Image (cartoon, grey):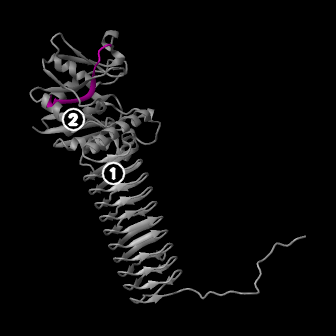
């Protein structure tokens, strides 16, 4: 059975009060629509179609990495009309699953449950019981409990509005049947729109048994209409994420003050303090400890390493038992070996740091290869950029770089060399020697400090 997925993403999103299309607003660091596409990708669907409208070029550009087809709904005339635009692209499919680009927390597990429940019939609906169903279409059933139709709240009677079982909008249908039902629905309703929900009554008239399934959590079927709802779903997402991490053995100092905006791979006894943000894909080996107010993005941290407060680590690899921070920044292609120390206000970019080396204070290392057992003093910088090209600095094993040194690349510091504090090194320095490059200190006995003139 070939499954096609249609994702409706054409809404204007007026209540977001934004120039950004609603489905591109981020939740957990990625667009709402990307969450839905990711869920669809896990179902093994043969074809995925996104129906777009407002801001279509922007939406397509933002989601260009996803394997899907794009169909435009030039005029928004309701959900039924939107699905109808996608049906030509569903040619050759056996079943069609309809999802929504602004309902981001739907899970593959719930969708598989809906597909299984409707495997032997031509139409299946995802329904839910809400304590307060205001705003949702209600599921109407006959005396035997069979679904007969869905009534939108605007068109419902007072008695129908008292029903708590609601239509989530998610459905799966036989493609041929869906084609037929979509051509038969009308727009005789308060909104003057073609409601996708009207196919339910048509299916019942055709004596089709309508299956139903329910979501694992209510958050899965909540849509985003404004920024308040977006924030509420963000918290729902983060609560579920922190529960998974803690049950897997991660210690979170305060789950309410942790944000996962990507994928975190954590081994045993990892500990994260408050206000840690994880973006992209991050690997934390056993025993890693991360202090408060840190951002980790697309990085790998070795076992037993401690990251102190207020660090930013992006695109970096850190070995075992290292000490990073506080207030350190590791930029892309920084590679630190085991037992390294990187301290206060140190920035490292596209540089390697050998085992046991220390860069403890106020230093910038860019485009550098630093050997093992090197000590780099406070205020040291590699002058790696001449305005056009970037050049490499090499520091040999066991070297000692005095404070306030400028290493003007390309340059090599020999093994076990010592560089005197305050030096500007422009040429290679030999191993096992002290190199100084600074002006001679002079004192002028008769010199007097300038004074302001008095009247």
Choose between 178 and 415: the one closer to the eye.
Answer: 415
Is 119 placed above or below 50 here? above
Choose between 329 and 167: the one closer to the eye.
Answer: 329
Position of residue 123 measured from the top left corner of the image (x, y, whole percent): 16, 26
Residue 200 placement: quadrant: top left
CA gap, disc 2 to disc 1?
Answer: 50 Å
Q: Which residue is drawn at 39% across and 74% down?
A: 367
Q: Total marks drawn?
A: 2
Q: Residue at x 27, y 31 (%)?
A: 217
Image: magenta residue range: 162-176
Position of residue 117 measured from the top left corner of the image (x, y, whole percent): 13, 28
Nearer to us: label 2 or label 1? 1
Give the mark nearer the N terminus: 2 vs 1.
2
Horizontally, is 406 left or right of 156 in the view? right
Residue 303 placement: quadrant: bottom left
* Local crowd size for mark 2, using a 10 Å CA cut-off: few (<14), some (14–19), many (≥20): many
Q: Is residue 148 among what the camera can see?
A: yes
Residue to which mark 1 is pinned: 271
Provide the major secondary structure of the magenta segment: strand
Is 163 placed above or below 405 here? above
Point out the image quarter for the C terminus: bottom right
């Amino acid at each position: 059975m070939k499954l096609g997925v249609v994702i409706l993403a054409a809404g204007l999103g007026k209540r977001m009060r934004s120039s950004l299309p609603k489905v591109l607003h981020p939740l957990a660091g990625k667009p709402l629509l990307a969450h839905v596409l990711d869920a669809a990708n896990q179902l093994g669907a043969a074809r995925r179609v996104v129906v777009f409208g407002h801001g279509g070029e922007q939406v397509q550009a933002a989601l260009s990495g996803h394997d899907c087809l794009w169909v435009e709904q030039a005029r928004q005339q309701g959900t039924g009309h939107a699905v109808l635009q996608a049906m030509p692209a569903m040619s050759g499919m056996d079943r069609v699953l309809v999802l929504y680009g602004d309902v981001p927390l739907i899970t593959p597990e719930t969708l598989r449950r809906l597909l299984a429940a409707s495997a032997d019939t031509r139409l299946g609906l995802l329904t839910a019981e809400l304590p307060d169903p205001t705003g949702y279409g209600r599921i109407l059933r006959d005396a035997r409990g069979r679904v007969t139709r869905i009534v939108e709240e605007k068109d419902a009677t007072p008695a129908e509005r008292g029903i708590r079982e609601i239509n989530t909008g998610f459905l799966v249908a036989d493609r041929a049947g869906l084609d037929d039902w979509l051509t038969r629905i009308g727009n005789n309703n308060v909104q003057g729109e073609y409601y996708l929900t009207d196919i339910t009554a048509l299916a019942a008239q055709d004596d089709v048994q309508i299956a139903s399934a329910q979501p694992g959590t209510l958050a899965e079927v909540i849509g985003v209409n404004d920024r308040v709802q977006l924030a509420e779903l963000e918290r729902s997402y983060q609560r579920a994420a922190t529960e998974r991490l803690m049950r897997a053995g991660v210690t979170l100092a305060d789950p309410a003050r942790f944000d996962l905006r990507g994928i975190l791979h954590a081994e045993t006894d990892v500990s994260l303090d408050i206000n840690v943000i994880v973006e992209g894909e991050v690997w934390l080996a056993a025993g890693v400890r991360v202090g408060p107010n840190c951002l980790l993005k697309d990085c790998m941290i070795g076992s037993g390493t401690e990251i102190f407060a207020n660090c930013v680590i992006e695109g970096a690899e850190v070995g075992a038992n290292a000490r990073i921070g506080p207030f350190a920044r590791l930029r892309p292609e920084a590679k630190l070996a085991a037992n390294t120390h990187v301290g206060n206000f140190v920035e490292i970019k596209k540089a390697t740091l050998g085992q046991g080396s220390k860069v403890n204070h106020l230093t910038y290392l860019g485009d550098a290869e630093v050997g093992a057992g090197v000590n780099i003093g406070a205020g040291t910088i590699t002058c790696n950029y001449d305005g056009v090209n970037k050049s490499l600095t090499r520091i040999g094993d066991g070297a000692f770089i005095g404070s306030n040194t400028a290493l003007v690349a390309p340059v090599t510091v020999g093994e076990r060399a010592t560089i005197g504090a305050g030096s500007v090194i422009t040429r290679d320095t030999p191993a096992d020697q002290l190199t100084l490059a600074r002006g001679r200190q002079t004192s002028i006995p008769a010199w007097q400090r300038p004074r302001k003139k008095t009247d």
